[in-house]
Image (spheres, rainbow, N blue to C red):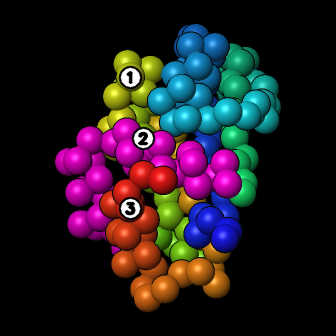
Amino acid sequence: MKSQIRSVEVAYIAHATEDEARIRSAVSSILGIGIEPEVQRMEGHFGNEITRVVYHITGEEAYKTFRKIFDSMPEKVKRSITDGISMYIDEHFSLYIRLDKQEIVRGRIELSESDAVRIKVKPRLYLVKGSEEEFYRRMIYLEKR
């Protein structure tokens, strides 16, 4: 049976003053990502290097990553997401959350709006039963497989 999660995209920006390898290692480890990211190097307004890192995870690996993220998340963070779940879902039923990049480097998962690791979760729409809010609440609190 196919997973109810079609894909997970994890993306963040690393600035020239940050240790990109340390961030990448922490993100991969804490979020359970086992693939290599797409890396795009850019130049900032003042000539500084900016690196955009994106992981595109599909299939069963997407489900495993989703589970790792939410199984590792403190209860208060999960509760914050599920209590305001409609704020995190777009018109295509994708779930968007932003995690604090510096906290991930410290080994913790916290929500953040700035300097964030952006996570986008796309469900398999034909497997969504009920409302999208209820679907994500069930998926977030689902027992580990």
Res. 9 visible in picture: yes
- Tell which circle, 2 or 3, labels the residue nearer the N-terminal end: 2
Circle 1 or circle 3, nearest the eye: 3
Residue lying farthest bottom? 130
Circle 2 or circle 3, nearest the eye: 3
Say which residue appears at 67% left-offset and 33% top-offset. 34
Say which residue appears at 20% left-offset and 48% top-offset. 76
Q: Which of 18 and 43 is in front in this view?
A: 18
Residue identifier under label 2 = 99
Percent position of residue 132, x then y = 45, 79
Q: Distance between the residues labelled 1 and 2?
A: 12 Å
- Of helix, strand and loop, which one carries label 1? loop
Please give left or right for residue 55 compared with residue 77 in the image.
right
* Relative vertical location of residue 51 with respect to residue 110 in this rendering, above or below: above
Residue lying farthest left? 76
Res. 16 visible in picture: no
Residue identifier under label 1 = 107
Residue 13: name its quadrant. top right
For the record, the magenta segment spans 60-88
Please give left or right for residue 50 compared with residue 67 in the image.
right
Neighbor class of circle 3 (other Cα within 10 Å; few <14, some 14-19, many 20+) is: few
- Of helix, strand and loop, which one carries label 3? loop
Amino acid type of the residue tagged 3 in the rendering: Leu
Amino acid type of the residue tagged 1 in the rendering: Gly
* Relative vertical location of residue 106 with respect to residue 145 in this rendering, above or below: above
Neighbor class of circle 1 (other Cα within 10 Å; few <14, some 14-19, many 20+) is: few
Q: Residue 142 carries which label?
A: 3
